[in-house]
Image (cartoon, rainbow, N blue to C red):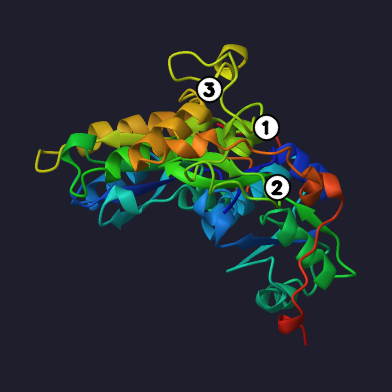
């Protein structure tokens, strides 16, 4: 899923300055799971903005809506309808959702309430970890299902660097993490060992084709069989 | 424009089965008061707390069970964390976090409504009217 975090209230206020009728639009899938942009968070932000505007001496009308997925146009019909009369829309979706909504609302400014962080998993209650960079050339089959691109601080392809100690990545020495970041390559070793597939580590990974990832410019997937 | 601070009490029915005496005591202390019985404090979300402050209340008070006595095991402790999350919003806005409060009462034990009302009334009076609330017509200054 896509993980996001809310922008500071003051930044959101600055973005919509001058607008007197706002619509807040949530997205009830990824960003709801990470407690940043679902309908509950829409309710929190709406109430907080109302109070913040009043403290600034402004009365702003704020409406709320939320749909299952802002990144899919069919789901956006409800938001487009709710946006009638709004001078600005604040989207609590990820960047993809914000852009899809903006494309549907050519005459209404759409602003992001979240900073989109990464593709990740809910590791524990209240803890989300990045575990996919969307590199376009998945290596998980070689690494026991643990991604060295996203989970190794150096994105190494062939084993750990010399900095790992006590099962932990050396990035813990540079920055405070709670819980601490494990060495992904140690995790890969442990996983393959448990699977009885340590021989996989003898295969050398060739230089990675980074052009399949974000280094290759805007990406797209085109499926002729799915096209109209 | 209202002059009396309004307190909204969200009361777990295990911790505070009877809210009438508390509301009476608060009104007797010169406040406006409303109590909302909740099946468990775990049902209270951060957006409930913030909305109450945005549209109605000067002070919101949750009455919950101690974490170890919660009917739904973790409900009360999680409520405590959500309340802290809502308070962080207040700090960010520039409102006093004390406008959201929590009292824990053990279920089945006698409740001193007068003392509870005194705590609430003292806090509400000290904070004054909520300038972020609809209809207050205030900016920064708050009458006592």
A66, A68: nearer the viewer: A68
In the picture of the structure, the residue carrying the numbered disc 3 is A177
**Image quadrant in which the N terminus of chain A is located:** bottom right
Judged left or right of residue B108, residue B16 is right
Q: Which mark is residue A135?
A: 2
The image quarter in which residue B112 lies: top left
In the picture of the structure, the residue carrying the numbered disc 1 is B141
Image spot of residue A184 (x, y percent): 52, 30
**Image quadrant in which the C terminus of chain A is located:** bottom right
Q: Residue at x 71, y 58 (%)?
A: A91
- Relative to A102, residue B75 above or below: above
Nearest to N terminus: mark 2 or mark 3? 2
Residue at disc 2, secondary structure:
loop
Nearer mark to the viewer, of 3 and 1:
3
Q: Which mark is residue B101?
A: none
Image spot of residue B11 (x, y percent): 29, 49
Q: Are marks 3 and 1 on the same chain?
A: no
- Relative to A140, residue A165 above or below: above
């Amino acid at each position: 899923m896509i993980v996001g975090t809310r922008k500071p209230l003051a930044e959101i206020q600055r973005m919509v300055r001058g607008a007197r009728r706002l619509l807040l639009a949530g997205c009830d899938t990824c960003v709801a799971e990470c407690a940043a942009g679902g309908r509950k968070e829409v309710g929190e932000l709406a109430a907080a903005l109302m109070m913040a505007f009043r403290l600034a001496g402004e009365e702003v009308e704020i409406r709320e809506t939320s749909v299952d997925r802002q990144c899919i146009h069919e789901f956006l019909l409800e938001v487009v309808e709710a946006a009638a009369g709004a001078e600005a829309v604040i989207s609590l979706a990820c960047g993809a959702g914000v852009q899809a909504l903006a494309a549907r609302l050519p005459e209404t400014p759409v602003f992001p309430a979240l900073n989109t962080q990464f593709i990740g998993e809910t590791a524990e209650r209240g803890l989300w970890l990045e575990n996919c960079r969307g590199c376009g050339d998945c290596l998980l089959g070689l690494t026991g299902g643990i991604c060295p691109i996203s989970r190794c601080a150096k994105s190494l392809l062939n084993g750990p660097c010399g900095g790992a100690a006590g099962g932990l990545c050396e990035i813990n020495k540079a920055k405070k993490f709670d819980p601490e970041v494990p060495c992904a390559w140690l995790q890969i070793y442990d996983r393959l060992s448990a699977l009885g597939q340590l021989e996989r580590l003898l295969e050398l990974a060739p230089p990675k084709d980074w052009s399949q990832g974000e280094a290759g410019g805007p990406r797209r997937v085109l499926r002729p069989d799915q096209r109209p | 424009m209202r002059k009396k601070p309004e307190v909204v009490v969200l009361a777990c029915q295990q911790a505070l089965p009877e809210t009438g005496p508390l509301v009476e005591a608060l009104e007797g202390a010169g406040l406006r008061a409303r109590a909302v019985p909740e099946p468990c404090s775990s049902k209270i979300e951060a957006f409930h707390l913030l909305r109450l402050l945005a549209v109605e209340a000067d002070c919101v008070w949750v009455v919950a069970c101690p974490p170890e006595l919660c009917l739904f095991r973790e409900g009360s402790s999680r409520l405590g964390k959500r309340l802290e999350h809502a308070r962080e919003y207040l700090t960010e806005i520039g409102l006093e976090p004390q406008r959201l409060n929590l009292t824990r009462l053990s279920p089945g034990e006698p409740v001193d409504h007068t003392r509870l009302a005194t705590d609430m009334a003292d806090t509400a009076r000290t904070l004054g009217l909520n300038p972020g609330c609809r209809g207050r017509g205030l900016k920064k200054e708050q009458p006592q």
